[in-house]
């Protein structure tokens, strides 16, 4: 497509980055299941390796099927470029690999996916990257935690699992006062429901594994750049601005301008760390993206109904769903007016044991460590995804002992509700929790 920005979101979700195959006319995106690409001659090979010419060398760096996915994600987020990765976690590492050197510092929200908290607090220190976690509900916490060595802020647009929507614009403004970029994990709402670049974010990362792929069959991730950040405004980003020894002294920001972050993510991040996305997974995720708008509308509709049902259930203490009238915040209305997806938590009466049993007794809902599927999913975070965290960290992340996490799918909503109701009553019977109102 020649000028993708002219089209609506639904059109981009189906078409952006793709064209009929010029050789065969194939309408679906071909799966280029190849490791490498024949060079025209030695000179062409040399100019590809020198980054003087764009083209395909080796699928650890670039692949035509993966490139369609990257263009589509850049179009959906309104960015200038994207780098697909093997997983959402790999996207985070590749993004920070462009920004941080040993001794550098990151201020991150404490309302993050449990795996991200693990990654940042346990593994980033191995690279010499220091992380401070702050409560994102007061944006000033980011300013207070900023040091001389802080090179980025990191938030989830809507947090996994409790759907707290961050004040993206305020946090971006504070980041820019310090001359550093805001990196946003936009996995939960997906670009259909939230577009962080509209509010000043500089880099977006995704786990494509969730709503974008949408059918629970492939792990993937992506880094997208807005193309607006001025790397030369200070001396904080030598990786972007200073000569790169491994490319004959090339300076990424100078040579590649508005898509320099993406180029560096591929030619340094993917080249040297190695977490490339396979062409097969790129193809499967592209299939998912085509129906993203349809699925998200249905998922939000179903989640609204399930949350309402649970909120009036005698065995449920509280429901975190951000669209319940009593939970609505100005941030929700501003950044995610049409919903944040179908992931939310609720607290059962009877604590840890009751939470585990509710999960056990569900029959339609699958007990899995995933979200964003067509199927409805359930898990007890304290005994699974958030198990490695301390009790204090679990509570701060919205994953205390009584918490059950749902990811509502696209099934008939009455069936989802009936399954949860049956599981709650069976669990109460076994644990001796009394059914009382309030
Ligand atoms: C799942 C998830 C990740 C990690 O993505 P993977 O594809 O599992 O590596 C990161 N952030 C959020 C919000 C997630 O839900």
Image (cartoon, helix red, strand yellow):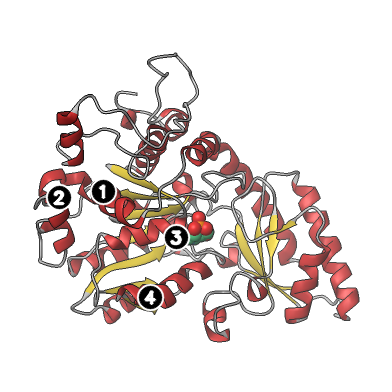
- Residue 197: % across, % down: 32, 50
Question: Where, quadrant-wise, is the C terminus in this rendering?
Answer: bottom right
**Distance between the alpha carbons at the discs numbered 3 and 4:** 26 Å
Identify the residue shown where x is 41% and y is 57%. Answer: 90
| Relative vertical location of residue 436 with respect to residue 267 in this rendering, above or below | below
Q: Position of residue 386 (x, y in %)?
A: 58, 73
Q: Which mark's residue is nearer the viewer, 3 or 2?
A: 2
Could you say whether the residue bearing mark 2 is in a helix, strand or loop?
A: helix
Q: Please report contact status of discs 1 and 2: CB closer than 8 Å, yes or no.
A: yes
Element at badge 3?
helix
With respect to residue 32, does 267 lie above or below? below
Name the disc covering residue 267, or none: 1
Judged from the image, the secondary structure of the residue bearing numbered disc 4 is loop
Q: Nearer the viewer, mark 3 or mark 4?
A: 3
Which residue appears at 15% of the width and 35% of the height?
47
* Lower sequence index among marks 4 and 1: 4
Label 4 to label 2, Cα distance in Å? 42 Å
Depth order, front residue of 421/431: 431
> What number is the disc on residue 89?
3
Kindly tell me whether mark 2's CB lies below 8 Å from ligand 1: no
Answer with mark 1 or mark 3, whichever residue precedes in sequence. Answer: 3
Mark in the foreground, 4 or 2: 2
* Label 3 beta carbon less than 8 Å to ligand 1: yes
- Residue for badge 2: 247
Picture coordinates of residue 83, whole percent (x, y): 34, 46
Secondary structure of the residue carrying tag 1 is helix
């Amino acid at each position: 497509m020649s000028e993708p920005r002219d089209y609506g979101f639904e059109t981009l979700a189906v078409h952006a980055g793709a064209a009929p195959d010029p050789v065969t006319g194939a309408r679906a995106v071909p799966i280029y299941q190849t490791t490498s690409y024949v060079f025209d001659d030695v000179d062409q090979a040399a100019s590809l390796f020198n980054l003087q010419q764009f083209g395909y060398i080796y699928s650890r760096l670039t692949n035509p099927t993966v490139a369609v996915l990257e263009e589509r994600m850049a179009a959906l987020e309104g960015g200038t470029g994207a780098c697909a990765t093997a997983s959402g976690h790999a996207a985070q590492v590749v993004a920070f690999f462009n920004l941080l050197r040993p001794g550098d510092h990151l201020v991150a929200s404490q309302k993050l996916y449990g795996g991200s908290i693990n990654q940042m607090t346990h593994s980033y220190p191995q690279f010499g990257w220091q992380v401070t976690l702050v409560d994102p509900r007061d944006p000033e916490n980011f300013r207070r935690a900023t040091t001389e060595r802080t090179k980025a802020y990191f938030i989830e647009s809507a947090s996994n699992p409790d759907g707290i929507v961050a004040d993206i614009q305020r946090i971006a403004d504070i980041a820019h006062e310090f001359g550093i970029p805001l990196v946003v994990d936009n996995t939960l709402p997906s670009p259909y429901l939230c577009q962080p670049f509209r509010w000043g974010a500089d880099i977006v990362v995704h786990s494509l594994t969730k709503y974008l792929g949408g059918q629970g069959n492939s792990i993937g991730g992506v880094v997208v750049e807005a193309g607006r950040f001025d790397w030369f405004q200070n001396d904080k980003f030598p990786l972007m601005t200073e000569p790169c020894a491994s490319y004959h002294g090339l300076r990424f920001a100078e040579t590649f301008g508005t898509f320099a972050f993406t180029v560096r993510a591929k030619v340094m991040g993917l080249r040297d760390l190695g977490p490339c996305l396979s062409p097969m997974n790129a193809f499967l995720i592209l299939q998912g993206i085509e129906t993203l708008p349809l699925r998200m509308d249905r998922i939000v509709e179903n989640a609204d109904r399930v949350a309402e049902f649970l909120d009036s259930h005698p065995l449920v203490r509280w429901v975190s769903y951000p669209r319940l009238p009593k939970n609505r915040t100005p941030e929700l209305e501003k950044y995610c007016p049409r919903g944040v997806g179908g992931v939310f938590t609720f607290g059962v009466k009877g604590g840890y044991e009751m939470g585990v049993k509710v999960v056990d007794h569900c029959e339609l809902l699958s007990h899995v460590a995933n979200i964003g599927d067509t199927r409805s999913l359930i898990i007890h975070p304290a005994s699974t995804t958030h198990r490695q965290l301390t009790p204090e960290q679990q509570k701060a992340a919205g994953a205390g002992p009584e918490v059950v996490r749902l990811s509502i799918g696209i099934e008939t909503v009455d069936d989802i509700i009936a399954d949860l109701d049956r599981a709650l009553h069976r669990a109460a019977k076994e644990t001796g929790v009394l059914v009382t109102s309030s």
